[in-house]
Image (spheres, helix red, strand yellow):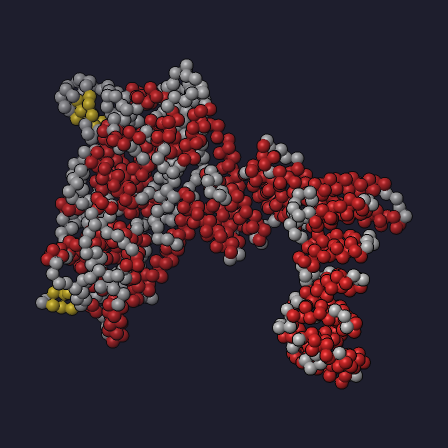
Amino acid sequence: SSHEHKLNFKKSKEVCLSYIQDAMLQKQWKRAAEFLTFYIESLEKDFSTQYVGPSEMIWRIGTEILCHHSHSSVKEFNSFTEQMKTLGVKRYLKVCLEHAFHLLCNGLIDEAYQNLSLAESWRFGEQTAIQDKEMKLIQAYRGLLDYYSWSKQKAILLEHGQDGFEDLSVEQEMHSCFRKAAVNLKEIIKIPGVWDLFVKCYVDLLEFYGDHNEACQVLNEYAYNSKFPANPNAHVYLYQFLKRHGESKKSLISALKILHDIVPSHELMIDFNTMLQKSKKRKKRRLGLEVIFAALDYAGWKENVKAWSCLARQVKQIVISEKHLDWIKQEWNSRKDWWPAFHFSRYLAKRNWQENESLSYEKAVVAGILLGKDCKYFKYVSHQGCKAQVKRFRTLKKFVNKHNPVYLRISG
Amino acid sequence: RDFNERCAQCSEVNWGLTDGGRFYCRSCHNVTERTREVVNAEFISNTRIQTISKGLRKQEKTDGGCEWYVCEGFQLVLKKQAEALETLGVCPQMKDEILCNFWRRYLQKSKQAYCNRPAGETVKALSVCDSSTDVDSEPERPSLLHLSLSESEGDLQTDCSFASSTSRVSESTSVCSGSVDGSLYLMKNQREKLRMTMPMTLSFCYMALLWLREPMTLSDLLRFVVEGHIPYLNVFQHFPEKMKLCGLDLKIFCVESWPVYEEVYNKMLELAAFLDLPRFPDITDSCFLHPDMLCMKYLMEANLPDELHNWTCRVVKKICIGEADFLTLVPGNKSTRNVKYDVLAAAVIVVVLKLLFLLDDRYEWLLSDFAEESNKNNKEGGPYFEFKKWYKVIKCSLDVEQKKLDEERAKYLWRCEKPLFYSAKKKSKVLKRRQMVVNLQNQFGKLSGSVQPAEKPKPSSFQLSWSEENTDGSCFHGHSLKGILQEKCGLLTAMNPAYWLCTVKLCTEKLCGHLAHYREVDFPQSYHFVLRLFSFLLRIQPSYIHDEVCVIEHKLFNKKLCKKSKYNTGLRK
């Protein structure tokens, strides 16, 4: 606090605001509310010369307090938000949108729908054009809620269908929801952006009504249009769609390629590698190896048995065929300095063996091939395995011993 | 003029006004007891008065408003302020005689009233626009507006220019203000006539208080204003219904900052000179404003030993600042430095503390330890004053009070129930806003939890008080200075042999406006602490007190400074 003894309107409201901020940061909602009551009169001199004028300040702060304060209710929140809507016409749609979000978060879906519908019908001269983005969002979310209704109707219909009832009104209702939803969802996903939920819902609708072409087109657009931000999910959705419809491996692989580039640690990499391994094309198999090595670079995959088994299978297969050892060499080159400590330490050997025998087995395969029979990991696990008289470990030991020279070639 | 009674002495009807506002017969110079106040309720002396007093105002406006002039508004403000001061204990004479007369004199001198051709008459020429004027062309009004608005409220400017351009220009009263002469009032060339402003109302009040030598310093007055005991902020609430405020009136009467000490003080000096007032009543050593008295008060408030008073009196005497000639205000006399009584007394105390404790962040603590030892051994008699203990107690209280004050600053409310609008068009918008504000305040007020104490704290001259009945030993009034004094040649002197000057050379006020430049980092922390204490009590910047300290030191050590001989001082870094 400064030891100033001067004070004017502007300064006193600045100081007040800093007290509000302090209280909010410390989650002292009562205190924040108290100081907010003194800040509110700045609405009476709101010439918005500052970037964030008092009315926006009050809207945002008030919302926070009402969200967190133990004594506040949805009714209070609604009444407050309604007042905020009248405060600034330039912000009207934004406030409506956030109001709807809040209602949705509190499970008040019908109210949210009403709010959105009301907002949709708002017109205010040139402001309508200026706030076009918010309007589109409002329509999109309303579309989403229409979808939600649609799926409820669908569920009812299915239930009745099972019971042998035919419900025409429900069906009609359902179709009308579909139409409403489809229109809005289609609009929003045209705009470059991240619309995961909207896309999923829209595709769901299209699939139900049998419009696979449209669905495919939508997903392709979403994934491949360069105007849209890079979005791993887009590729996932496309892949899942293609898989559902029994598309060729070729198209499935191509769908996952970019995903691998963006998110090498994605869980679908296992599927990807599996497909690639089986491919007849050499390039694809090579890619498969790259994919699975890349995935295992990530800590989240360290204990994933499936991933290790993929790698183990492929590496083993290469060793047996004695072709393309250079692939392994290439992949191992950048990893030989840190994978041993990362995956194949003695501590991990002990732990893996104790916790998950299969994991330790698969890892031992890989370790044995990449690091040779004398590496800590392999030695410990295979020893333990043989001691425990687990058959596959004995087989593994023999295998590694036989192919030990390979290791020398790889590590060289 | 309105007074039609026959003179008791000569039976003539030929009245004039004395300076004191009493009627006197021009024929026989018989002064009556009748004052203007009795004759008519308003003080504007021209033909308008008759219409006003007889209630024949033009009811031009359909909203029940009437014509009113800016100076009438100010008059009302002063009246309210004087009433409030009376409630605070100031003698009624202040309102009925002194302030009244000052105000009349001001009106006279500024030619707003009590003279043949009040300046207000020219207003009519400007505000009445020919009906033949094109609606689209604004004659001079917008440019007047642009000229007049010198402060930061550029928003007012836009609103008013909208108002003037959209409304019909043919109305005879100014569309930009509720008052008749609002726009004229803000024209720049008013400065020669010392245009009245809201801060100036406080200058008037202070001047009247000073004339009566009331026990209220300027810092007290301003503090009461901020605390709401004296109408200032939103004072227009007290205007009668028919006096409508809008447009430029807001610029004149609406206050959006706390009054500033320097501004009010300097205006008071200007005003006193403008009114050609004679030498004010003498400030003698029995007056509250005399340094000896004020020092006593501040020593008590600062919880310092009463014994220090001897020292303050000694300093006051030595540098002759206790003389009536020094202390009394002589308007227009530029050769004497004008005295800020509160700052002066505080500065004297600071100097005394420096004399006795040195305040170099070392010596005062050494002395304190010494006193502490003595206190341990000496259980009889009064305790010796320990600087350390005092520091702890005061720092604690000061921090608490400062924190309270800071929160009050954050919670300060500027708006009141009576809303203001720039123009009739804005009225509904403003009222809606107000309604929303009230609703929101209620909504969040309920969530605040604590019950809001709506009462203002009772006004008090003392902000800090200490009682000797407290057994926790937190009151130092009765403590003895024995630990830091010694006897030399029959006189008690300080053990401290040294002194450091705040500044070796004083600046010229004319060049930079200050006598010294205070920066906290350049001075010892104990010194800063003491300044901070008085800065809080007086609600002024520490630098003002520092300036005064410098002046006092220069007077005190004048000889030594002149000689430029060796002395135990140095400018601290």
> At x 38% / y 58%, what residue is drawn?
B400
Q: Position of residue B299 (x, y in %)?
A: 25, 57
Q: Nearer the viewer, residue B397 or B189?
A: B189
Q: Residue furthest right?
A: A164
Q: Residue furthest bottom?
A: A387
Image quarter in which the N terminus of chain B is found: top left
> At x 32% / y 47%, what residue is drawn?
B223
> At x 51% / y 50%, what residue is drawn?
A33
Q: Position of residue B521 (x, y in %)?
A: 30, 59
Question: Residue B27's quadrant in the figure?
Answer: top left
Q: Would residue A96 be found to the left or right of residue B478 on screen?
A: right
Q: Position of residue A178 (x, y in %)?
A: 77, 42
Vertical side of A366 occupied by A104: above or below: above
Specify whether residue B90 is in view. Answer: no
Question: Residue B365's quadrant in the figure?
Answer: bottom left
Q: Residue furthest top?
A: B132
Q: Nearer the viewer, residue A409 or B246?
A: A409
Image quarter in which the C terminus of chain B is found: bottom left
Q: Would residue A289 be found to the left or right of residue B555 on screen?
A: right
> At x 35% / y 53%, what residue is drawn?
A3
Vertical side of A234 occupied by A41: above or below: above
Q: Would residue B18 be found to the left or right of residue B88 on screen?
A: left
**Number of marks in picture:** 0
Specify whether residue A135 is in view. Answer: yes
Q: Position of residue A179 (x, y in %)?
A: 77, 40
Vertical side of A266 occupied by B134: above or below: above
